Amino acid sequence: MRKILLGTTAVVGAALMGMGVAQAQEAPTVRVGGYFEFTGGYVDDNFDSAATTGLPASRSKVDFRSDMEITVLVRGKAANGLSYGAEIELQMDNVTNGGSQNSGNGGIIDTDEVWGFISSPTLGTLQFGDQDSAADQLKVAAPSVTNLGESGGWDEFIAPAADGTRYLTTTINDGSDSTKIIYLSPQFFGFDFGVSYAPNQYEGENYLLPNATTNAQLQRNTNVGSIRNELSGAIRYRGSFGNVGVAAAFSAMRGDAPTASGVRDPNAYQAGLNVSAYGFTVGGHYVWGRYSGSAPGRAGLAPGLDNSNNWTLGATYRFGAVQVGAFFSQAKQDNALVGVADREQQVWGLGAVYTLAPGLETFINYTNIEDENVRAFGAANVAANYRNRNVDVIIIGTRLAF
């Protein structure tokens, strides 16, 4: 399959570069875009008590956060009609100078996505670099409004469970921006499709070390801990019937498991449907497969774990400068511990967004999270430390997109 995909991509790339229709060419232009967002949150979490955390006092209920992303967009057009370009995304990440969040500096800037493309209206688009997978780019998910959803803004304000997860309700993974090649077809009678391939999970300027000696270098060379040969794809339909718009998609991915005994190859699938009419959009998605954690398919499934699934239903309505939305999600994953039932997470929320001016909006939403059979912060992996968690999150903020 890997050889087929690489060969097909090479043929598509050669065809794109070989087009000979004379058109007016355009030198590359550079534009800067992005967004800035400020959010305040109030959190009522029964896991934040001193008795649960083991700290001298309960965790604060109120917090502010800032977020931003700057995107450099390069666009050009060749004489043969091809469009080409690149995108470089710089983001504010939750990383600190000392590698610890305790330093209080969560504003380090790093690259998010870095990729180039060549595109033809008749042959499709070839993308290459650190970009989202085809399965993610073409997926159809439950409708939502700004910072509301199954893994929306609420998860930025709560502490993770002992296994590092905040949410299990999610969509198919985005490929983690690992370096890959992606082909996206043109639209035919409402249908389009895409495929992508990544040799491993690494991104950016990474390479194998020919003289590996340390354990870390040897692990890097053998891709220990990283899925390999990740293939993803999707087929999507978008169309309208009178005043009714329809979007539907099926997305899938699979990979070779890390080199660990008994770990099964991961896979994940998503089916989604949205219907829009008269300002309303309603729909949902269902995710299932051989995975665990918050990113379906990004790691092999450990021995003793059953498959996982989650689903979300959502609705939005727009009237003038206001948009409102609501959603309901459920997820289930195996805890793989004797005497402990499966972890089940239920999330629902309501939200509203008001557009103050072009590119400038303010938003408010409320989300409730019920997490059953989840291990408390920092607790040992024994049955006595699994309990039910209930969280209420209210967030309010503003977002400027430019």
Image (cartoon, rainbow, N blue to C red):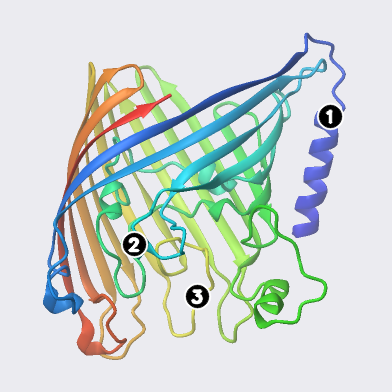
Query: Above or below — where is 346 with respect to 163?
Result: above
Q: Which of the pair 366/402 is nearer the observer?
A: 402
Q: Which amino acid, by three-letter code, is at mark 1?
A: Met
Q: Are marks 2 and 1 in contact (CB under 8 Å)?
A: no
Q: Is residue 385 above or below residue 228?
A: below
Q: Residues within 10 Å of mark 1 (few under 14, many from 20)?
A: some
- Tag 2's secondary structure? loop
The reply to whether the C-beta atoms of the residues labelled 1 and 3 are less than 8 Å apart is no
The residue that appears at 46% across and 68% down in the rendered structure is 291
Of 367 and 218, nearer the camera is 218
Q: Identify the image quadrant of the C terminus.
A: top left
Please identify the quarter of the rendering in which residue 255 is found: bottom right
Q: Position of residue 329 (x, y in %)?
A: 26, 54
Task: Residue at 25% x, 50% y: name it.
Answer: 154
Q: Quick one: label 1 or label 3, which is nearer the N terminus?
A: 1
Q: Quadrant of the N terminus?
A: bottom right
Question: According to the image, label 3 marks what residue?
Answer: 301
Badge 3 density bin: few <14, some 14–19, many ≥20, Cα 10 Å: many
How far apart are the alpha carbons under marks 3 and 2? Answer: 15 Å
Q: Which label sits on residue 17?
A: 1
Distance between the alpha carbons at the discs numbered 2 and 1: 43 Å
Front residue of 328/79: it is 79
Q: Residue at x 77, y 77 (%)?
A: 212
Q: Residue at x 33, y 36 (%)?
A: 37
Say what amino acid the circle numbered 2 marks: Leu
Disc 2 target residue: 168
Of the numbered discs 2 and 1, the one sitting upstream in the chain is 1
Label 2 environment density (alpha carbons within 10 Å; few <14, some 14–19, many ≥20): many
Q: CA distance from mark 1 to mark 3?
A: 41 Å
